[in-house]
Image: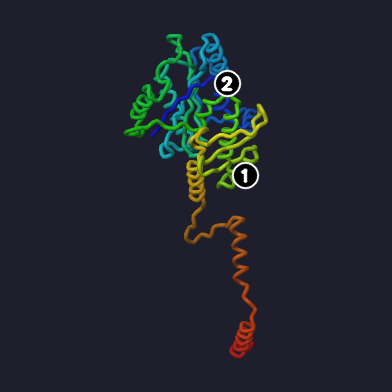
Amino acid sequence: MSTINVQPSKDAAASVAYVLYGNNKAFRERLRSRGQTRAAALALSMANGSTSPAEFVARAQRLAKATGRTNELYSYVLAFHPDEFDVTNIADMERIKAIAAKLAGRMHSADHLVVVHSDSAGGHGHAHILVMNHDNLTGKALQRFTSWKRGLHQLNDELMAEEWLWVLPDPAQPKPGWEQRREAFAAGGFEQTLGDAVFDALHDPRTVDQIAFEAVLAEQGVTLAVTNRDGWSFKMRRIDNSKVGRKKASALAPDFTANAVAAMLQQRAADVTAAKPQPVPGVELEPDEFDLIAMRLKRRMASKTPKTPARERFVRGHQRQHSREYGD
């Protein structure tokens, strides 16, 4: 089962940088210093035969400027159910890449970049398909498959059926998560910066519950505000005017709402529990540090008995009886 969604992008450089390196500055610098990207698989198709993402960006910018187009790219996200592809399996990630590239070719006669990610919070493989807003055959801006209702999900369903993958019988338009919603906000603006910070906090391995989530948010200067009327909102000081700005979670992305975060944390806890080694009959597992400390405390408490007069008399009597019977 797959879902497909699309958003126009006015900034090809920002879109490509995000799919290759993410939005966390330290993480980006670490990847670049190692000559790596966050791509589990990557494919680039350009009319001039280039294999450089930098050239892809440069051409998108040149064409948009020459034609006066607002949108430099169209950004698609093709997401699969976790049961269909194993994000730890290289062959599965390569297959997602092949399917996404085939979909891009059927949608448009345009240059495109496919980047597969395996690091989503929900553990599902997904592909980012960045398509240049320029038809190489007509020289015009893209017209077809630029919205979910304009045949996009039908084309996707046809391809999934050909690939022997599950097709939803009555699909509804999926709500775009932050990885796609961020394209709708100004690059480097308040909303995008705030959303990136929330996204990073949610993906931080320390975020195991809401308290931990708020602590990680605080490290990035973000505060979670909870009200009965508005639900969750996020606050952060703006760079442009130094005032504290506020944005409702639902206005940023559906995966930032209270219900969505609770579901994600519950799934994360279930995954951790499932990953813990299970006892094997006849085999004693080595306890980890915390379990060992808990075990020692339990034994120490169990060994302590209240020293009441009645207890002391009982012990002395038991010792005398033991001496008479065994000659100690």
Q: Secondary structure at mark 2?
A: helix
**Which of the 4 image quarters holds residue 301?**
bottom right
Q: Secondary structure at mark 1?
A: helix
Residue found 52% across the figure and 17% down from its top: 72
Residue found 44% across the figure and 39% down from its top: 82
Which quarter of the figure is the C terminus placed in?
bottom right
Which quarter of the figure is the N terminus placed in?
top left
Residue kind at label 2, given as amino acid type: Ala
Q: Which mark is residue 35?
A: none
Q: Which residue is mark 1?
A: 215
Q: Considering only vertical position in the picture, is 225 above or below 16? A: below
Residue 116, given in percent of the width and then of the height, sits at 49, 29
Residue 64, given in percent of the width and then of the height, sits at 53, 13
Residue 175, given in percent of the width and then of the height, sits at 44, 32
Residue kind at label 1, given as amino acid type: Ala
Residue lying furthest left in this view?
Answer: 169
Q: Which mark is residue 13?
A: 2
Residue lying furthest front in this view?
Answer: 229
- Taking depth in this image into account, of 68 and 249 the one nearest to the observer is 249
Within-10-Å neighbours for mark 2: few <14, some 14–19, many 20+: some
Residue lying furthest right in this view?
Answer: 242
- Which mark lies nearer to you, 2 or 1? 1
Within-10-Å neighbours for mark 1: few <14, some 14–19, many 20+: some
Contact (Cβ within 8 Å) of mark 2 with mark 1: no
Marks 2 and 1, Cα distance to the nearest angstrom?
32 Å
